[in-house]
Amino acid sequence: MLSTIGLTVGYGSRTVINEASLNIEPGKFIGVIGPNASGKSTLLKTMARLLKPLGGAIFIDGKDLWKMSNQEVAKKIGIVLTEKIQPGLLTNYEIVAMGRYQYTGSFARLSHRDKLVIEESLRATGALTLADRRFNEISDGEKQRVMIARALAQEPSILILDEPTTHLDAKGRVEIMLLLRKLSREKKIAIIASTHDVELAIRLCDKLLVCNTGMIKIYDVPEQLVEEGGIEELYGFNGELIFSKDTLVAEPVVRDGSDFKVFVIAGGGSGLLVYRLLSRLGYRFITGVLHKGDIDYAIAKGAGGEVIAEEPFREISEESYNTALSELKKTDLLIYTSPPIGKLNQKNLELFSAGNALGLPIIYYSRDKCKELNLENCEHVSSISQLENLLEKHRRNSLRNRKNFAIIKTE
């Protein structure tokens, strides 16, 4: 087990984290998150004995880290840093074999057991098929697997990784985080990794260490960070981003086309792409009536939309319907996404008919046309690209009509 008592870390006389006391248990995957320059890398490098602490102490299995020999430390701690290595023509097998250096003695000869450990480390990280290839010939994601295998070959009880998902695409980031979670459980080692992938950290880590304003806050249950509003506090979104507690995704708030307002009748997941499109285009939108707990409810709120909601498992009330109707009258366009309709949301069909009666421009977004609705005055689109083109056309028309109205009013 790794533990710290009153650990203070920094560079020179500059303190970045002050008096942190931690206990890192075997078999746990620990995520370290925080804004840039909050001390994440400095903390990990100090724990790995690459930097001297400014104060306090670090213990591994009860022994003071700074009183252990280099060989002892290498057998206890494996490290993967963000810096890219330049190993020349070395193969991946040879790189992983470097993890056995502290076991091979003066002549650095690999024993039969050393070779077994190297092979198992490659296998555990999904890199065995890469063994005979040169390191400089493989992808960034594959390189990261090889570097983790090298650290595993040390047979450490603690694995420290500084931003292991940097330089990786979305698929690679998920794969590496899943791999680390799996290794912590299968190998019964403590894995400590810093990351900017907050959503993945909340989903996959057993515990979070949050670095901010010179302090570390420990979340034994990662979901606590969301529950307590810690994401917004940590990154100071200031209205430019909305962090959705429902989806664990930070959505940018764009208001480039805020003079144009759209009403969306959706539900059951039928509005997901529409909400994201409207958010990206910067259009203000309102949607309803949605039941709380509906996936559309969560996504719409996360995308910065106004949501008219009804309690779960209840029919849409007259109050909710009238609120929606009142808002519908203030919008420039209605989009109907062909949601599944049942007894509980039957009034959304009435809302559609009301929009038709008001003479609002209506876009019907669905793969197929609905036979139950009067679509005579509607424009039907079956793809999101068609919808984007129509939205821009209606926005231009709306602006033109407003200018004409302003001219008439002035005259």
Image (cartoon, rainbow, N blue to C red):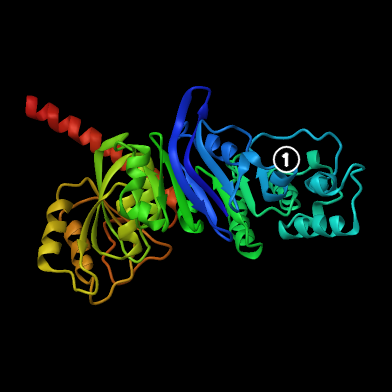
Relative side of 121 to 191, left or right: right
- Quadrant position of residue 117: bottom right
* Numbered-mark total: 1
Relative side of 9 to 77, left or right: left
Q: Residue at x 84, y 42 (%)?
A: 134
Asked if 21 appears above or below 114 in the picture, the reply is: above
Q: Position of residue 140 (x, y in %)?
A: 69, 42
Task: Name the kind of residue labelled 1 in the image.
Answer: Asn
Relative side of 243 to 1, left or right: left
Q: Residue at x 74, y 35 (%)?
A: 85
Query: Depth check: 396 or 149 in front?
Result: 149
- Quadrant position of residue 269: bottom left
Q: Which residue is mark 1?
A: 70
Q: Position of residue 294 (x, y in %)?
A: 32, 65
Q: Quadrant of the N terminus?
A: bottom right
Asked if 355 appears above or below 162 in the picture, the reply is: below
Relative side of 98 to 142, left or right: right
Query: Depth check: 164 or 139 in front?
Result: 164
Q: Residue at x 20, y 47 (%)?
A: 331
Q: Is residue 257 visible?
A: yes
Q: Position of residue 224 (x, y in %)?
A: 36, 56
Query: Depth check: 157 or 68 in front?
Result: 68
